[in-house]
Image (cartoon, grey):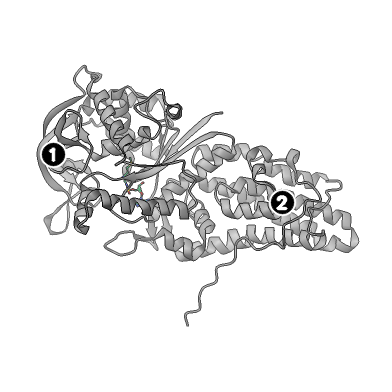
């Protein structure tokens, strides 16, 4: 069975989960579910990034020791994963012993080997330069801008501070050609294409050696054989992706999942994943991941989301207000994946009442109610299907190859568009065949039409379930489709519904319309 290993970034525990966290993990969840239904052996990893100055500071501000602080906040991310119905296989925390061992092992592996220019990969020096705690990133003078009050600001908007301390350096500058060759040999490594060009020109511009240890605080993984230093939090954090599949034990069964098929990240952390990470791995003698996809950022009603503005979108509140599957649908349907997008109440309600309540919800409710009322609460006989009936259903099952290609490209919005074309076809078929008119005039034909529709809905539900698993499970239950019969291998006429299967009860609407509260 072919393996599929997909990862989310691990989230900083300095703060509560927000829409950005929900979005990145949701995209991975839809992929993981899709690949599982497609028969692949999936490993889906998420977790929390718990070391570093930013987390240490946040704990100190609360007057709590960093370990207890991270224990608490990490739970909120697990809760988010549960509330959003994320099907992760492993949740890693960088404070776990397995991860500390793995970080020290990668450090030693890098240090024990030479760079392509035959120099030590790691050397001791002194860092004197700018650091942004918010980004946990080093910046050169040339990258900074003048902010309010003459303060220096990183391109991300984060404030920087001057840092001077002894530090170990990774000889990143020696890895420039190896990286450029890797990008050229692996044209799909960085997606979307515009991001790829951005990274390639950055590396072509030349690379500075990277400071990979700190000495002025202590919340991190100790550098092997030098207890004055802790490892730079990004080297620590990136290593989570291999820790979780058994590193440094290359005999571990889990190690079969490496290299990862996909690291999903936001655009702000692309450089860490496509420059530093493959360089660290190559230096340690480990194969880089196959692909990194950088998605865009959400704004809120047109405004940049920021804590100081107070317009942070709380994913728990969204789910409470609109329902889980409508939120999952909206986030992946509204914006071409990779672009920035705007969250607005109006757009959310428009999708919910349109695509979901009207198009898919009504289709299911109309058809299932007619079956329930007119066919004795059982899946009707199919009698003889004509060419129109057959084509209507096979068009749905035959689209799996196209859908798979879209998912492999992380084009979620197009995948959903494709499924919704089937929904539109189904609604057209209902109107054209008008089964309600056949009830008296031609009951066997009415049964055939309703059977065909139920079968169309079954196929649509299989394709849509990675995006909206709970709602599609309700559809399967109404149709009497068992849990083991919901994979992609059940698509198409060979596994069609069995006539006479009883429906468990009166069908209930799956997507109720959103009605504005009357505040007047
Ligand atoms: N800890 C690092 C990642 C280490 S991975 C080895 C980190 N953590 S984070 O908590 O700040 O991460 C956040 C993820 O949320 C990033 O992928 C980021 O792009 C995403 N988002 C943060 N705000 C966002 C929006 N407003 N919209 C969409 N995604 C956003 O970075």
299 lies above or below 209: below
Quadrant assignment, res 64? bottom left
Front-most of residues 180 and 175: 175
Q: Which percent across, then down, holds residue 381?
A: 84, 50
Front-most of residues 369 and 119: 369
**Residue 266 seen:** no
Quadrant assignment, res 9? top left
Disc number placed over residue 507 in the picture, else none: none
- The residue where tag 1 is placed is 215
In the displayed structure, does residue 397 sit left or right of residue 146?
right
Q: Residue at x 43, y 60 (%)?
A: 316
Circles 2 and 1, Cβ within 8 Å, touching? The answer is: no
155 lies above or below 128: below
Dot 1 falls on a residue whose secondary structure is loop
Quadrant assignment, res 401? top right
- The residue where tag 2 is placed is 480
Q: Residue at x 32, y 22 (%)?
A: 285
């Amino acid at each position: 069975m072919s393996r599929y290993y997909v990862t989310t970034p691990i989230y900083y525990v300095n703060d509560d989960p927000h829409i950005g966290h929900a979005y990145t993990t949701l995209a991975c969840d839809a992929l993981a579910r899709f690949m599982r239904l497609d028969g692949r052996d999936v490993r889906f990893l998420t977790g929390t990034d718990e070391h570093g100055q930013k987390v240490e500071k946040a704990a100190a501000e609360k007057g709590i020791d960093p370990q207890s602080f991270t224990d608490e906040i990490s739970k909120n991310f697990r809760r988010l994963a549960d509330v959003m119905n994320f099907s992760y296989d492993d949740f890693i925390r960088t404070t776990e012993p397995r991860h500390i061992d793995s970080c020290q092992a990668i450090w030693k592996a890098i240090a024990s080997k030479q760079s392509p220019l035959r120099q030590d990969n790691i050397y001791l020096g002194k860092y004197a330069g700018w650091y942004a705690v918010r980004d946990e990133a080093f910046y050169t003078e040339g990258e900074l801008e003048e902010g309010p009050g003459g303060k220096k600001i990183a391109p991300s908007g984060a404030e920087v501070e001057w840092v001077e301390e002894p530090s170990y350096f990774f000889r990143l500058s020696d890895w420039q050609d190896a990286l450029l060759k890797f990008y050229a040999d692996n044209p799909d490594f960085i997606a979307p294409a515009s991001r790829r060009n951005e990274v390639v020109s950055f590396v072509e511009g030349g690379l500075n050696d990277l400071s990979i240890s700190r000495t002025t605080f202590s919340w991190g993984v100790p550098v092997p054989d030098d207890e004055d230093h802790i490892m730079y939090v990004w080297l620590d954090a990136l290593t989570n992706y291999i820790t979780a599949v058994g590193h440094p034990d290359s005999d571990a069964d889990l190690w079969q999942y490496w290299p990862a098929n996909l690291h999903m990240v936001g655009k702000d952390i692309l450089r860490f994943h496509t420059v530093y990470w493959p360089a660290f791995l190559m230096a340690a003698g480990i194969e880089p991941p196959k692909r990194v996809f950088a998605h865009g950022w959400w704004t809120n009603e047109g405004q940049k989301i920021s804590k100081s503005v107070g317009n942070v979108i709380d994913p728990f509140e969204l789910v409470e207000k609109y329902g889980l599957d409508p939120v999952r649908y909206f986030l992946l349907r509204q914006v071409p994946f990779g672009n920035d997008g705007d969250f607005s109440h109006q757009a959310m309600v428009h999708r919910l009442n349109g695509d979901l309540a009207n198009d898919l919800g009504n289709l299911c409710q109309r058809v299932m109610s007619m079956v329930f009322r007119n066919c004795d609460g059982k899946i009707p006989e199919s009698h003889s299907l004509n060419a129109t009936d057959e084509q209507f259903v096979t068009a749905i099952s035959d689209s799996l190859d196209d859908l798979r290609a879209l998912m492999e490209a992380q084009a979620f919005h197009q995948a959903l568009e494709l499924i919704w074309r089937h929904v539109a076809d189904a609604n057209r078929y209902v109107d054209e065949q008008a089964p309600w008119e056949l009830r008296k005039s031609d009951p066997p034909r009415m049964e055939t039409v309703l059977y065909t529709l139920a079968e169309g809905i079954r196929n649509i539900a299989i394709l849509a379930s990675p995006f909206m698993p709970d709602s599609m499970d309700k559809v399967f239950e109404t149709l009497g489709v068992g849990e083991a019969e919901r994979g992609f291998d059940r698509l198409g006429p060979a596994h069609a519904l069995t006539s006479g299967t009883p429906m468990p009860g009166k069908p209930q609407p799956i997507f109720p319309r959103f009605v504005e509260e009357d505040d007047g």
